[in-house]
Image (cartoon, rainbow, N blue to C red):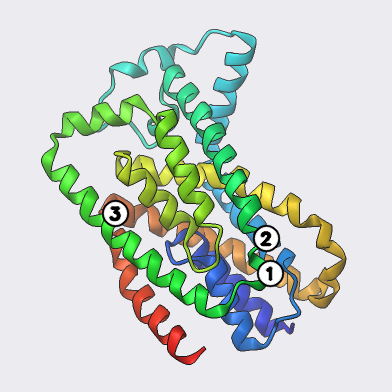
């Protein structure tokens, strides 16, 4: 792998990690085009670490609030006054901070949901990890088409549900937080998204929307639950660290830096798109990409 390959792979990973277009699928396609079959799976997982850092920085206040709620929950400490008064706010008055951790009760439900989602994702991920080394490139292209269909279907479903509801009903659903059932479905969706070509963020957000989670809340929860998923994948792949000699230190550093910058920018952009309810736009890119891949690979 040379410097050019490293830069391109880092930028593409950063952009595709949070946009619903499958970062693992794009890396598989690019590595196929560049003839980098000797690159170990650990390289792809390492590139998720800068993405993970981008999520942590972007949602640092929300993550800190959830850890504070967890600490008070474990040690039975009283909640601050601002949490006691937060239940009187409506969704329109609340900031994005309130969607997952705006009150003590909501934060606890989010913590339980994250645990349930991570457990299901982990169980599915153990199975899918056995398929990754021999995952054919044409299957990746089919994954692109599957993701496109999922985005279109969830977009139509979400718009119909929103048009049939009043703002007060949407606010009430958001205030209830993520239920255990919704968390399990989202976990299964995220587990399926570990396959190359199937977007993790796209499948996770779509799964949340199908369960009745409002768009902005679905997106934020999707990114929060990506943290334990990415970290666990990194730990599991560390056994192959000796194979990283095929990459080199300098290309790896360049990839990671490029990935972080691109990831933070794409995350900021995607949050704006989701609030406008335009997630299905990405299907216009994935459909021709998948078809061309099936034809030429």
Q: Which mark is residue 186?
A: none
Q: CA distance from mark 3 to mark 1?
A: 30 Å
Q: CA distance from mark 3 to mark 2?
A: 29 Å
Q: Is residue 98 left or right of residue 200?
A: left
Q: Position of residue 92 (x, y in %)?
A: 24, 33
Relative height, residue 293 to residue 142 (above, below): below
Q: Position of residue 61 (x, y in %)?
A: 52, 35
Q: Is residue 167 left or right of residue 47?
A: left
Most foreground residue, 275 or 228: 228
Q: Which mark is residue 133?
A: 1
What is the secondary structure assignment of the residue under circle 3? helix
Whether label 3 touches label 2, CB < 8 Å: no
Q: CA distance from mark 1 to mark 2?
A: 7 Å
Most foreground residue, 117 or 124: 124
Q: Reading the chain from its start, which is encountered first: label 3 or label 1?
A: 1
Q: Position of residue 255 (x, y in %)?
A: 67, 70
Label 2 crowding class (10 Å Cα cut-off): few <14, some 14-19, many 20+? few
Is the N terminus in the top left, top right, bottom left or bottom right quadrant?
bottom right
Q: Reading the chain from its start, which is encountered first: label 3 or label 2?
A: 2
Q: Is residue 281 left or right of residue 105?
A: left
Q: Residue at x 46, y 69 (%)?
A: 143
Q: Residue at x 35, y 67 (%)?
A: 148
Q: Which residue is mark 3?
A: 154
Q: Position of residue 159 (x, y in %)?
A: 19, 50
Q: Which mark is residue 130?
A: 2
Most foreground residue, 253 or 296: 296
Whether label 1 touches label 2, CB < 8 Å: yes
Q: Residue at x 67, y 48 (%)?
A: 231
The nearer-to-camera label among 3 and 2 is 2
Q: Is residue 33 visible?
A: yes
């Amino acid at each position: 792998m040379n410097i050019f390959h490293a830069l391109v792979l880092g930028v593409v990973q950063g952009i595709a990690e949070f946009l619903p277009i499958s970062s693992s699928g794009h890396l598989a396609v690019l590595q196929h085009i560049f003839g980098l079959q000797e690159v170990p799976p650990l390289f792809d997982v390492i590139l998720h670490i800068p993405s993970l850092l981008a999520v942590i920085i972007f949602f640092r206040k929300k993550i800190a609030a959830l850890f504070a709620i967890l600490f008070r929950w474990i040690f039975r400490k009283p909640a601050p006054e601002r949490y006691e008064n937060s239940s009187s706010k409506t969704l329109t008055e609340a900031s994005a901070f309130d969607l997952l951790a705006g009150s003590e009760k909501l934060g606890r439900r989010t913590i339980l949901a994250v645990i349930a989602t991570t457990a299901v994702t982990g169980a599915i991920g153990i199975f899918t990890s056995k398929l990754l080394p021999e995952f054919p490139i044409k299957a990746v292209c089919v994954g692109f088409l599957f993701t496109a269909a999922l985005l279109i279907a969830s977009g139509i479903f979400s718009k119909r549900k929103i048009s049939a509801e009043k703002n007060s009903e949407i606010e009430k659903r958001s205030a209830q937080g993520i239920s255990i059932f919704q968390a399990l479905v989202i976990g299964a969706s995220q587990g399926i998204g570990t396959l190359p070509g199937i977007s993790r963020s796209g499948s996770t957000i779509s799964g949340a929307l199908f369960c009745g989670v409002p768009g902005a809340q679905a997106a934020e929860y999707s990114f929060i639950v990506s943290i334990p998923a990415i970290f666990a994948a990194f730990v599991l792949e560390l056994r192959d660290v000796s194979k990283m000699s095929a990459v080199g230190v300098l290309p790896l550093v360049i990839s990671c830096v490029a990935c972080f910058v691109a990831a933070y920018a794409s995350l900021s952009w995607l949050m704006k798109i989701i609030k406008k309810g335009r997630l299905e736009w990405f299907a216009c890119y994935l459909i021709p990409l998948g078809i061309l891949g099936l034809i030429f690979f």
